[in-house]
Amino acid sequence: MSLKKIALGAAAMSAVNILKLLAQFVTVPILARLLSPADYGLVAIAMPFILFVMLIADSGLGMSLVRTSRDNRAEWSTCFWLAILMGGVLSLLMGLLGPIIAYFYAEPKLTPIVWSLSLIIVGQTIALIPNAALQQQKKFGVISIIDLASIAASISTAVYTAMHGAGVWALVGQQLALYAVRIALTLWLSPFKPQFLFDLKLVHEHLRFGRDVLSVNLVGFFTRSMDNMVLGKVLGAAPVGIYSMAFQFLRLPFMLVTGPLMYVLYAQLSPVRDDKEHVKANFLVLTRLLAIIIFPAMAMVAAAQQPIFHLLLSPKWAESGQIFALAAAATAVQAVTALNATLMMVLGRTALQLRVATEYFIMWAAGLLVSVWFGLTAVALAYVLIVLLYVPRSLSLTLPVIGCSYMQYFGTMLLPAGFALLLAFLYHAMILPIDMNEVLQIAVAVGFGLIALLLSVGLQYRSLMADIRHLHKR
């Protein structure tokens, strides 16, 4: 398997995510002006509960079926009906929990919001198995088109309803439109067509595999979502809105680059997982490429956060920019090292992946519960400290699986990280003191980021191309 196939698949999905980003550059400033931080905060409080139940409804069945031939129609159909059954039950239970969530947060508006959003739980399960068939056949272009159409429908719904005074319901409608379009297109375009077959005996293996995947996903979910829940309880809806807006931008590298790459990498490397040298070579080359792309971009956005957030979102979101600047380094490291999780999945080391995820969750939970009482800045600093402290520990567990040394691994990211830090420092020391408008400040930051990227590529071009040619020959 060549690196080219991975790159093409990831590029197809990344291209759509770039279009999503461009659409957000247009729509987020509009919504940010039409809606209040409290509107964003209410949805940010409700969504973690919805996403948690969606993870349970998934149960890893789709990921397991990617490894199973579609000739086993009874297995695929049984998983399809089982997923819908679980989704329907969990959607109902989530709706019943709506008043309890509203009471806990002392926000009566949360009850109808949770009722409405619970519909997307069953919607997600309807599309789960048909989407797995698309992934198995490596129809990443089709998957990307479905995502793009869904995003277009959701953004159109949100902007239209917000302009007509819908308030927080614009954000709720955005989610409902997203899943409605995704369900319709996935069922239409997927090669999988459900049959009226149901035999639980056929899916025991999928349920066992899904159990491990679900455990990892649930730990990861709590790690990502508990900050909004804790902040909402201690500080209220408006601070959650400020915090969640910052992390919308902080998670862009994962959404645009790392996430699509992980999605494609799992399907591409699973058939050759017994060839650890080949897996290791792919892993190191892709980690190097991620570092070249992500480190300079994040460093310069952090350096120029003030004009970027002021120009894009308006002055009321200035604190979100400050949170972004504090957490950018840690988020960049997480985006680059996230391939380790896919590596463990490919090699079947889900128990080790669960251990890493659980240890990090415990550290982050402790740091969050202590720092939240000191405000958003303290939470951001705690996040950075914990991420940077845990990286060496996680690498000590995962790198030996493929016989990769620290020197080999950190050698893939040393130059991009160094150039990114250097140019961010120069921007602060030399550019910020100069009186220039916000557009020019952003343009200079973009230029510095491109310089860091070009220097990173130029100084390791020969070795990078040699590694890529070697993988292509295999």
Image (tube, rainbow, N blue to C red):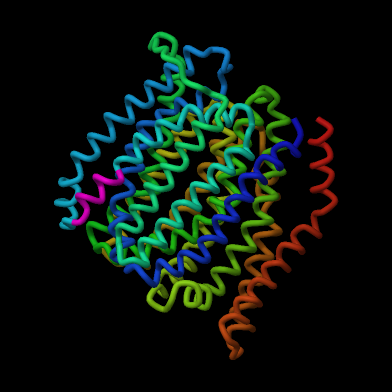
Q: In terms of depth relative to the viewer, which is nearer, 211 or 87? A: 87
Q: With respect to residue 376, does 187 lie above or below?
A: above
Q: Residue at x 46, y 31 (%)?
A: 128
Residue under the image location 38 percent in, 25 percent down: 83
Q: Out of 276 and 47, give the one closest to the viewer.
A: 47
Is residue 115 within the magenta segment?
Answer: yes
Residue furthest to the bottom in view is 435
* Quadrant that contains the C terminus: top right
Secondary structure that dominates the magenta span: helix
Question: Residue at horizontal 46%, vertical 43%?
Answer: 181
Q: Quadrant of residue 119?
A: top left
Q: Position of residue 437 (x, y in %)?
A: 58, 86
Residue at left 63%, top 77%?
A: 427
Image quarter of the N terminus: top right
Q: Is residue 292 above or below residue 286?
A: below
Residue extent of the magenta highlight: 109-117
